Image (cartoon, rainbow, N blue to C red):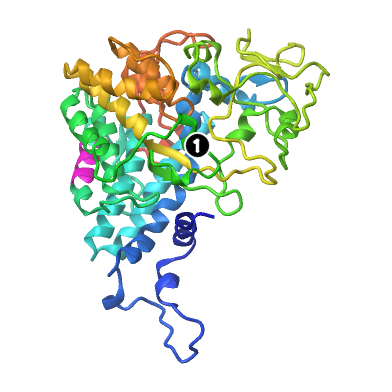
Amino acid sequence: MNNFKKYFYQVLSVGVVSTFALQSCTDLTEPVYDAIPADQFLKTDAQVAAAVGPAYSGMRGLTWDWFNPSEATSDELIVPTRGGDWFDNGDWLAYSRHTWTAQHGPINGMWGFIFGNISQVNQLFPAVAANKAAVDELRAIRAFYYFMAIDAFGNVPIVTGASSSAATKPRAEVYAFIEKELTEAIPSLPSGKAYSRMTQDAATMLLAKLYLNAGVYKGAPEWQKAYDAINKVVTSKNGYSLSPTTLASFTTQNQGSGESIFNIPFDSFLAGGMNFQMRTLHYANQQTYGLGNSPWNGFCTLADFYNSFESGDARQNMWIKGQQFSASGAALKDAKDQPLAFIADFKKDQMTDADPEFQVAGIRSQKYEIQRNNPNGDQDNDFVFFRLADALLMRAEASLWLGKTADALADINKVRVRSLVAPLTTVTKEDILAERGRELAWEGWRRNDMIRFGVFSKERKFMKVTDKTRELFPIPQNRIDANPLLKQNPGY
């Protein structure tokens, strides 16, 4: 295992006291403390990293609680009902059809993921109050979760202490809170590359994401601020560089990618949750990859999105299509003894076993390299949250709105040329949205992008609801029942 990963897991699996108070078990005469002496506490960066480590521990949950609603509500991922599989009380269909309600269980799970982690971070502040670097790192981590909160729910409580009964605040006020937390914290954060920590570059990219969506979040665009922030990341002294291919940043051992700015570590044995292959592959694909567990035959992409890739685009390699084979080369069949051949287009999003295509409907994803001969359901790939290609496309978008068309073209073409598609000679906002879709497919940003570009509520296959109130999720009803100070979003 990569040494950075080992260190990260050690930080997450031990408390501050056990990390530093019990330094030796070979000298039996050494005093054993039940608290860290004040003059030895948080004196080094390693000690600060260990102290704030538990604040990172919940991030792995985002591959389910943040990724699913961010992608399954968009035009690039759908979870159709396949006979008796994937109906789950209609929750997945509600995502793709935009018919969810305040009683939707997975949306409640997303709220719990976000605010449970905010609570976890808040509990750490008293222990590190004397150390500004530790405090500011916690502020940046909390802002990370608040970014998800403002994006998903809009008007949310601002909770900075132990109380969980705070009142809903307007979205613009939440925006100002996140901006203040990040701008004040960034100077104290690690300035170099620090694996999976909220460094200055990672926090600045988060700030740029906030500014990029200012028109949505607070009703007034901040394109210059967005440009200035993302330009700092692109031109960082840490020297991020595009990988040879897009998929090179998503291999099973992707911790060495020079393109990654902020990753969330996973490990098939020590830190589970990286299981996209289980969600998308057919049951019989267990034989293709020598997997220890049978996949679930669920997630796939939609035909219109799949067909948006240009001929020769190297990013088409992220898709699994057509006839499937075992590791020995034998053609696989589905449960009805028909050829197991994935198809792009399908007629229904709710299929029974009477529908001949119900098991093969939809092209599947292998963007995250599938780990062959893996005995576990979880993989070793780290989740890529921020990377350089995203930063370049963000800068291109800000440049275009600022009238810097040549700069926008230069940035978008860096991404396109890497994928072996012809550079553009002109660029529009539609070009940038389309390029972001192809480059960042299944990375969790599509809902965010579609809302910002004004197309999230545009009618498409399997989605007929054009009500713009769907651009915010409802505050889960059971959360309002528990805290009457919360105010429901419009439309629910």
Name the foreground residue: 147 vs 90. Answer: 147
Does residue 107 appear in this view? no
- Please determine whether, in this image, residue 411 is positioned above or below residue 18: above
- Please determine whether, in this image, residue 294 is positioned above or below residue 361: below
Q: Residue furthest right?
A: 337
Does residue 251 appear in this view? yes
Residue found 60% across the figure and 19% down from its top: 363
Q: Quadrant of the C terminus?
A: top left
Type of the residue with mark 1: Phe
Name the foreground residue: 308 vs 47. Answer: 308
Percent x, y of residue 439: 42, 24
> At numbered mark 1, what does the secondary structure look like: helix, strand or loop?
helix
Name the foreground residue: 245 vs 35. Answer: 245
Residue found 79% across the figure and 21% down from its top: 333
The number of discs equals 1
Is 135 covered by the magenta stretch?
no
Is 181 covered by the magenta stretch?
yes
| 138 with respect to 250 (left or right) | left
| 226 with respect to 193 (left or right) | left
Residue found 80% across the figure and 26% down from its top: 330
Percent x, y of residue 3: 47, 58
Q: Give the residues in magenta.
A: 174-183
Residue found 32% across the figure and 37% down from its top: 147
| 207 with respect to 266 (left or right) | left
Q: Residues within 10 Å of mark 1 (few under 14, many from 20)?
A: many
Name the foreground residue: 159 vs 166. Answer: 159
Percent x, y of residue 281: 66, 29
Q: Quadrant of the N terminus?
A: bottom right
Residue that mark 1 sits on: 250
Magenta highlight: main SS: helix
